[in-house]
Image: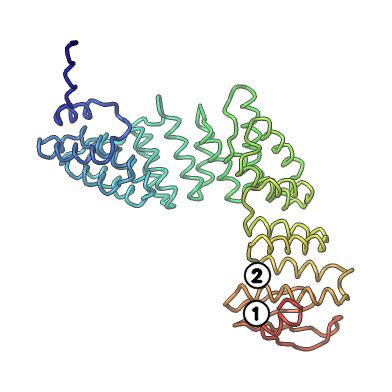
Amino acid sequence: MPPTRPLPQAPSPLAALHRFLASPSAPPPPPLPSLLSLHALAVTSGLSPRPDFAAKLVSAYSSAGLPALAALAFAASPSPDTFLWNALLRSHHRASDFASALSAHRRMRASGARPSRFTAPLVASAAAELGALPVGAAVHGYSVRFGLLEGDGSVAVASSLVYMYARCGGVRDAVRLFDEMPDRDVVAWTAVISGCVCNGECEEGLSYLVRMVRSAGDGGVRPNSRTMESGLEACGVLGELSVGRCLHGYGVKVGVGHCPLVVSSLFSMYTKCDSTEDAWIMFSALLEKDLVSWTSFIGAYCRRGQVEKAVELFLEMEESGVQPDEVVISCLLAGLGNNANLKCSSDRKRRELMLAAYATSNTQSQSALEHQDMLITISSGHVEFIFPTGTSHVEGRATYLVPDLWGRVGLS
């Protein structure tokens, strides 16, 4: 009879605790019951105040989506070091609790702990999200003082500061810092391009995008979907259809042309440039067609005088289950009012009533829709048409209740 092998013994809790302490700085978090057991054992064995162990607990709880327990683990250490402070900042950042991140940063600076190249990007990003320019400028100041903009990790620090200045409206500071960077990553390029575009400097934003594309050909970083989004937005604002088409081709070439974000941006650019044929291709490729995309396309048809297609698209939108609002109704009424072929037709009047009925059924507040031939006021279930003297319509004023209006246009 062969000898029986002894059953493997489970590791002792203390051994598991020491293994957790010796694990890499960012290990996969253990299952929550095991993590809670390790935490309890650390408290009873006196290990929980140690900054290195507390930092691992904070990171593990943060990875598990438990920021409250991460904060509890942090509080057990009476003298947190920079590594532990960074773990807490990262936990708040991961939970999108940017206000708590800035509060922790204030406590960190008051404690005398010195910020590192990992601290600055976390705080700068939180300041960017909250529009806290003074905090971001303070991070810039100590980054220069402590040499965080030099050597390893300097690109990440500088890129986060460029992003912060751009988000907080300091586009000139963002551009100045970007131009001083010896090396730039995609975050820095995207931040300066989007910062210029969002602050109305669309031509400058496009010039930076052209520089980025050229540098990519020489071995530099390529634009990502966020970069392309900003460039296409600038093309739409400036009406630069030819540049937008070039960006479209480049996006396909580098592999981001079919990204949902880029497809949506291409659609927006083509509609703003009134290129309805290209916009239709992009519109068909959209995975989710929301009210904004429907309104953009309907507005593009109206601007080009293709009101019949705009009305057809409006009906498709309604059939798809997307409810119209006052904006899309206004686009269609303006298109009907500016279209000479439909101006005197009875069909046009019927459509105006139908569109007003749609608007009434989707608004509870006072609103007004205007175009060149009438003012339509919608309030509390009533639609009032005010026709100026000299139009092709009957002069005067007419008020309809919503149920009566639906019956008049044959939709009840």
The image position of residue 207, as x and y in percent, is: 65, 38
Residue at image coords 63%, 22%: 218
Task: Compare residues 73 and 180 and report the one nearer the observer.
Answer: 73
Q: What's the CA distance linking mark 2 and mark 1? A: 10 Å
Looking at numbered disc 1 in the image, what kind of residue is underneath it? Ile
Task: Compare residues 214 and 331 and report the one nearer the observer.
Answer: 331
Residue at image coords 22%, 42%: 74
Q: Secondary structure at mark 1?
A: strand
Q: Is residue 287 above or below residue 44?
A: below
What is the number of callouts on the image? 2
Residue 401, numbered label: none
Q: Give the residue furthest to the front.
A: 1
Task: Compare residues 309 and 108 and report the one nearer the observer.
Answer: 309
Q: Residues within 10 Å of mark 1 (few under 14, many from 20)?
A: many
Looking at numbered disc 2 in the image, what kind of residue is underneath it? Glu
Q: Quadrant of residue 140?
A: top left
First reached walking from the N terminus: tag 2 or tag 1: 2
Circle 2 residue? 326
Circle 1 residue? 378
